[in-house]
Image (cartoon, grey):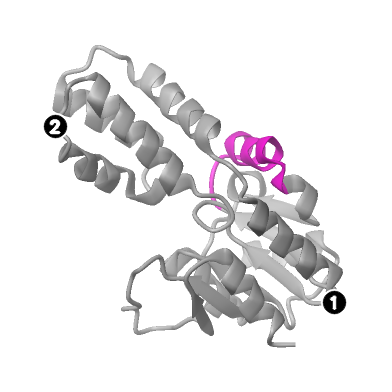
Amino acid sequence: MPLLLLSLDDTLLDRAGAFRAWAAEFLGQIGAPEYDLEWLLSIDADGMNSTWDVAEGLRGRYGLRYSALDLVEEIRQAIMDRIRLDPLTACALAIAEDSGWVPVVVTNGESRQQEEKLRKTGLDRYLADWVISEEVGVRKPNPRIFAIAAERARMRLTNAWMIGDSPEADIGGADAADIRSVWLHRSRSWIETRYAPTRTADGVIAAIAEAMASR
């Protein structure tokens, strides 16, 4: 049975869409111009930057009286309130599992927040297990986190696939772990020269299909 490793944010769950929806609403509430949305999205960097940095950026740009802690909690809760599991993604995971694949999430982030996403959306019901960087003390692209995922599933990394949207964390990590990968391009071009994905796809459902077709 092959191991199917998957990133969480902006792969299985649309974290970017949830953040964008909150950001547009929040900027409207404080009377910021519409074009500041792109600035706020760049500060967030698809969740790669700390939520504390986003909060401090907002406080500094607009002179907000909110405390950084209050803003951080608002952002985190807003994302949690808006994030959803696409039923078609759930279906694709179920089909993969029925076909003998073992789906395991490998994600960077805080344990409490990431696990809450898994359970609140119901995604946990479609997974064999998950590995969160804060919990295990190592982050993608370090290949050790992929080895831990295999250990959790009581499997070997041989024949495993990694699916994710981050060139460095997901595809670079897969390359370092010597496993195959599918990159979710999200309308971006591949520019990295040190390594490359085995396949590319425009969404996680297509990516799962790519991996399954390799058998």
Per the image, label 2 sits on a secondary structure element best described as loop
Residue at image x 20%, y 43%?
39
Q: Position of residue 87 (x, y in %)?
A: 66, 51
Q: Nearer the viewer, residue 33 or 173?
A: 33
Q: Is residue 99 above or below residue 50?
A: below
Q: Earlier in the sequence, mark 2 or mark 1?
A: 1
Q: Is residue 84 above or below residue 153?
A: above
Of all residues, the one furthest to the front in this rendering is 88
Q: How many marks?
A: 2
Give, as a three-letter code, the residue at label 2.
Pro
Q: Position of residue 194 (x, y in %)?
A: 39, 83
Choose mark 2 or mark 1, whichever is in front. 2
Residue at image x 81%, y 57%?
128
Residue 142 in sight? no
The residue labelled by disc 2 is 33
Q: Could you tell me what secondary structure mostly forms the magenta stretch?
A: helix
Residue at image x 55%, y 76%?
182
Q: Position of residue 136 (x, y in %)?
A: 66, 50
Q: Quadrant of residue 213?
A: bottom right
Q: Which residues are magenta?
A: 108-123
Give, as a three-letter code, the residue at label 1.
Met
The residue labelled by disc 1 is 1
